[in-house]
């Protein structure tokens, strides 16, 4: 992609938090970007507003009952409208040079793969789709000649730091974690934490699901798995370090013991700008990093006892053959149940652990070679998690 040519761009999940940051960057350089397609789950008004502002060629709403409403909102604009899962997949398949994959959850897998299969540049924010798909996602990208650009801040940091050496020289990567709102809390208080408390992230403003995942540190678990698949790393090559200020996003240690880090204010527009400009750099709107004002950067070892979701991520990576798909699916079910008030906060990790145990016992493990394999393991795991939910909800910690 030449730096000077106009880049066509698609944003999957345009109405979310990452979508919002992405549209903000596109808005800043209208001469450089042309919007091909935008998608949303159910918010017609927000999607139509963006479609008009950016003269999108195609928009897709996942909720198929809203096609009429979407068409009415965009009547006379020339924007083509689609609805349902297939329309969101079509958005990924439409010819755009660069695609932001920012749907939340495993629902984003097929649309992201549609972009991957065309050999597009795919900025990947949606970690769940990678965790769900296993290593076949990256294999498929390699086969199609797609370029996966990590948009998750930690992975974007690793991507930048990894350029300092080669695979043989790499010792380990270090993913930092803020520790979330319950970093200093006692286990009994974490167990009872409310939705409101879980939604108060100390440093980042994000969508609801990932904010809850940050409080349970399941987000960091998903990120460990994400790093393993993105960069072909074994679990032993990945460390997690709690760093409450969220200024260092990731580090890479090389054989000579040099450690390269990427720093920046906690603002997703920085890693997204890196993906959007890549292989060049564009201007980013985040606040300038003022380390003198911040004063101190502190670090702690992660606590695998109080945050068992992190331990389960390493376990599921070591188990392999679909276990990370189960980890993600069970967590999606658990988070939805927590939001609905059906389980306590502490039960999220217990449900994930029980679903993983059940799945290992069932002997269903198999290599994952297609999206359908991943989606069928995902469905089995969701059903098992839903079946285990009542007994987990009753069990006190
Ligand atoms: P969000 O909830 O704010 O937005 C999600 C987007 O996906 C919305 O546009 C929504 O309409 C769409 N969507 C949701 N369910 C859908 C479905 N079933 N079908 C089609 N579209 C659907 O979430 P977010 O915080 O923007 O996060 C998006 C992804 O990026 C997640 O995978 C998250 O883990 C990842 N991520 C987010 C951040 C962040 O700062 N927000 C940072 C790193 C990674
Ligand atoms: Mg992250």
Image: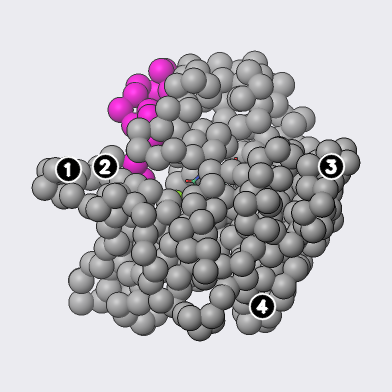
Q: CA distance from mark 2 to mark 1?
A: 8 Å
Please identify the quadrant where the N terminus is shown: bottom right
Q: Nearer the viewer, mark 2 or mark 1?
A: 1
- In terms of secondary structure, where does tag 4 sit? loop
Instruction: Assess disc 4: are there few (<14), some (14-19) or many (≥20) residues with their C-alpha within 10 Å of its C-alpha.
Output: many
The residue wearing badge 4 is: 119
Q: CA distance from mark 2 to mark 4?
A: 37 Å
Residue 188 lies within the magenta run: yes
Q: How is the image coloured?
A: one colour
Closer to us: 29 or 180: 29
Asked whether disc 1 touches disc 3, contact meaning CB atoms under 8 Å apart, the reply is no
Residue with the most extreme front position = 76
Magenta residues (range): 174-191
Residue 121 lies within the magenta run: no
Asked whether disc 3 touches disc 4, contact meaning CB atoms under 8 Å apart, the reply is no
Q: Which mark is residue 72?
A: 3
- In the shown orientation, is residue 335 left or right of residue 274? right
The residue wearing badge 1 is: 294
Asked whether disc 2 touches disc 1, contact meaning CB atoms under 8 Å apart, the reply is yes
The residue wearing badge 2 is: 245
- In the shown orientation, is residue 127 left or right of residue 215? right
Q: Which mark is residue 107?
A: none
């Amino acid at each position: 992609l030449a730096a000077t040519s106009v880049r066509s761009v698609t944003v999957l999940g345009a109405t979310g938090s990452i979508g919002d940051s992405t549209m903000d960057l596109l808005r800043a350089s209208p001469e450089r970007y042309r919007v091909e397609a935008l998608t949303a789950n159910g918010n017609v008004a927000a999607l139509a507003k963006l479609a008009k502002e950016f003269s999108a060629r195609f928009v897709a709403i996942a909720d198929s009952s809203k096609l009429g409403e979407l068409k009415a909102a965009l009547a006379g604009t020339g924007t083509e409208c689609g609805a349902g899962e297939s329309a969101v997949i079509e958005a990924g398949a439409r010819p755009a040079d660069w695609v932001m994959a920012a749907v939340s959850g495993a629902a984003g897998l097929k649309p992201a793969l549609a972009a991957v299969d065309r050999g597009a540049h795919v900025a990947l924010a949606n970690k769940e789709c990678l965790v769900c798909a296993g290593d076949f996602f990256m294999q498929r990208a390699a086969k199609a000649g797609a370029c996966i650009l990590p948009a998750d801040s930690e992975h974007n940091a690793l991507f930048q730091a990894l350029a300092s050496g080669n695979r043989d020289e790499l010792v380990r990567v270090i993913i930092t974690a803020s520790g979330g709102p319950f970093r200093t809390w006692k286990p009994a208080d974490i167990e009872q934490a409310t939705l409101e408390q879980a939604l108060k992230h100390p440093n980042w403003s994000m969508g609801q699901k990932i904010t809850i995942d940050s409080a349970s540190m399941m987000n960091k678990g998903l990120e460990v798995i994400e790093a393993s698949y993105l960069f072909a790393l074994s679990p032993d090559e990945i460390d997690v370090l709690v760093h409450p200020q969220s200024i260092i996003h990731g580090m890479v240690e090389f054989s000579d013991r040099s450690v390269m880090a990427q720093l920046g204010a906690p603002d997703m527009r920085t890693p997204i700008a890196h993906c959007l400009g890549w292989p060049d750099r564009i201007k980013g709107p985040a606040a300038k990093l003022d380390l003198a004002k911040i004063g101190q950067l502190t670090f702690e070892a992660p606590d695998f006892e109080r945050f068992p979701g992190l331990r389960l991520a390493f376990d599921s990576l070591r188990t392999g053959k679909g276990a990370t798909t189960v980890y993600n699916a069970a967590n999606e079910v658990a988070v939805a149940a927590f939001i609905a008030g059906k389980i306590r906060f502490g039960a999220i990790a217990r449900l994930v652990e029980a679903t993983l145990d059940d799945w290992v016992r069932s002997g269903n493990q198999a290599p994952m070679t297609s999206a359908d394999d991943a989606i069928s393991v995902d469905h089995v795991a969701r059903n098992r998690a839903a079946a285990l939910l009542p007994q987990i909800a009753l069990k006190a910690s």
